[in-house]
Amino acid sequence: MAPTDKPQTHGPAFAAASFDISENDLMIGGLSVRDVVAGTGTPCFLYDAAAMRRAYRDLETALGGFADIYYSVKANPLPAIVSLFRQEGAGAEIASVGEYRAAIKAGVAAENIIFAGPGKGMAELREVIESGIGEIHIESAEEIARIEAIGRPVKASIRINPVPDAQAGAMRMGGKATAFGFDEEELENVLPLFKDARYIDLVGVHIYGGTQILDADMLVSQWRHGISVAARMAEMLGKPLETIDLGGGLGIPYFAGETPLDLAKVAASIPDLKALLNEHPLIAEAHIIIEPGRFLAGSGGLYVAEVNSVKTSRGTTFVVVDGGMHHHLAASGNLGQIVKRNYPIVAPAMMQAEHEETATIVGPLCTPLDTLARNAALPKLKAGDLIAILQSGAYGASASPVGFLSHPAAKEVLVEDGTFEVIGR
């Protein structure tokens, strides 16, 4: 039986793990979801600032000074969200000039921004180099030539596509033929490309094996491999490295049966990782970076929509809501899922109600792809009720086809200490 053939019932457990519940109401930032959306309208993304700050602080504590955290802006590029993590002490990892501008607008110092991505163009390289950037993470020979042509000194790391044995997570970012970085086995042929560079100061390495990692042992193994690659590169260069970017990839649970990343196990591994660095004098003093995005922002977000109608077709109950895949492509299963499974979903103003109904939640678009949940166990819903999709703080609006069918964009709302504010890009 396929996963979607069974009623999906994990929403309430996820809600209780991330948010407070007061009688029938799901609470966010000290307010009920229904009170917030009464002021903002639907559909909307609600972001709990306290939950995001808590995720950052928990990770920082687990790292124990081993690495600095650079927020991966692609996860949620709203300047208000980037600013929240800057306030906590994060730098920013960007993948476009638009994300660079968002980070600068959010108050991130230019020297605390690193720029990765396989297709950086001349115009965006020129803007970030002339305006100021901490490091460029170089991924091709053409990129070397473009930076040299700009003619401004800049620090750089090279991004390495690790060997297959170093891969982990639900989505591999390397280890096979890929557009990302230089293949690890070609390292000795890549380094000579920088020999005659006049403006590139090659100071580090960036290695990123996978994303959505929930297994702490896999994550730590990936980090260990990154350190070994850095040590080999430093020996080839015959000089110390200033920076080792071990990538991101820290996951959050979305589906029934998944459990959160075990930060206690990560913390227990830190002394061994520090010792591994110290075994190699040329990297012992390197600045270690990790660049999580989803882990920091994901669990603090909800996507809320209002029920438009409820209908039955050939034995299946369909709940039609005013939001859909144009706002939240990932929840529809059309952003990387092979087997479509439901994100956790609840009725945020009916948290104590019995789950009397098994329904398919669909949006307003004229396509069967616009399905937000399949066979979801929910209270009996009617027009005017609310549904909320959890784990929606990352890869939501900015990762979705918001222009499809020209429906209005979802509002995005930051909630903290009993107040809320509609925030924009």
Image (cartoon, rainbow, N blue to C red):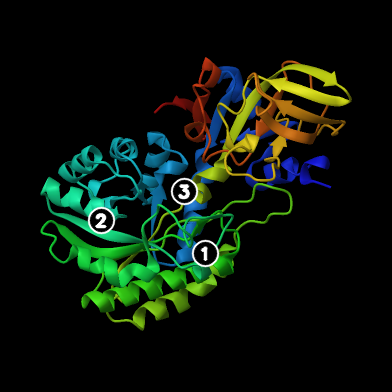
Quadrant, the C terminus:
top left
Q: Amino acid at mark 1?
A: Gln
Front position in the image: 155 or 290: 155
Q: Which residue is mark 2?
A: 141
Q: Amino acid at mark 2?
A: Ala
Which marked residue is nearer to the observer: mark 1 or mark 3?
1
Q: Dot 2: few (<14), some (14–19), or many (≥20) neighbours within 10 Å? A: few
In the image, 124: left or right of 387? left
Which marked residue is nearer to the observer: mark 2 or mark 1?
2
The residue positioned 51% from the left and 67% from the top of the image is 164
Q: Dot 3: few (<14), some (14–19), or many (≥20) neighbours within 10 Å? A: many
x, y (%) of residue 116? 34, 50
x, y (%) of residue 351? 76, 34
In the figure, residue 103 lies in which quadrant?
Answer: top left
Q: Dot 1: few (<14), some (14–19), or many (≥20) neighbours within 10 Å? A: many
Residue 253 seen by the camera:
yes
CB-based contact (under 8 Å), mark 1 and mark 3: no
Kindly give the residue lying farthest to the bottom in the view shown: 279
Q: Which residue is mark 3?
A: 293
Q: Which residue is mark 1?
A: 167
Give SS at disc 1.
loop
Residue 7 seen by the camera:
no
